Image (cartoon, grey):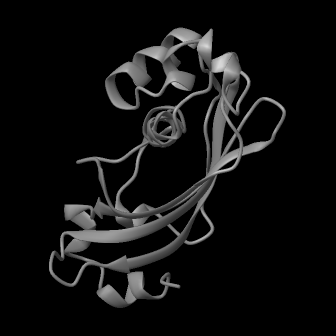
Amino acid sequence: MTKSLYFEDLHVGQRFVSEPEEVTEEAIIRFARDNDPQYFHVDPFTARESMFGGLVASGWQTAAATVRHLLERSGATFPGGVVGVETTIAWKRPVRPGDRLHIEGEITGLRLSRSSPERGFATFDSKTLDRAGRVVQTLRATMLINRDPRRRETSGADDVRMKTV
């Protein structure tokens, strides 16, 4: 079941877990050809000679998959979308064809936008994990999220500030 979430629906400590999705060799090569055409991402044969010993996904593909998992596979939608404004990312392990990835994350901070009262900032810390539960990526993102126009008029800023870390 998908639930639409506005800024007012979020709270510090709120967790998101996505359904797993398999990363295929074809998807790795297709993404890399368009975005990160290094030989260990696009050529399974020459990739055997790389430091990875075989074909691996681009870290940017893993980051993009993390966003997709949050937006399409976690059971939540965000009316008007989310806009990333700051990100810290670390790639911990290579992602290989056949890996099944999912995300586990939580809201770690909330604050209202001073310049756009119709929006707020949410900080989201996540881990992207493979089938064996090994962390392949960590990501901290601050995202701009729409406030609910119906509740924005009736709730004071103090209600939201109490949730800020």
Which quarter of the picture shows residue 116?
bottom left
Q: Name the residue rendered at 18%, 69% in the picture.
A: 118
Tell me what residue is drawn at x 78 percent, y 29 percent: 131
Q: Residue at x 40, y 81 (%)?
A: 160
Give coordinates of residue 156: x percent, y percent.
Answer: 29, 85
131 sits to left or right of 31: right
Residue furthest to the left:
115
Q: Is residue 134 left or right of residue 32?
A: right
Which of the 4 image quarters holds residue 142? bottom left
In percent of width and height, residue 4 lies at 38, 45
- Residues 115 and 51: in front is 51
Residue 48 point in image, percent of width and height: 69, 17
In the foreground, 41 or 60: 41
- Tell me which residue sits at (23%, 48%) in the image: 80
Compared across the picture, whether 137 is left or right of 26 comes to right
Q: Is residue 33 above or below residue 80?
A: above
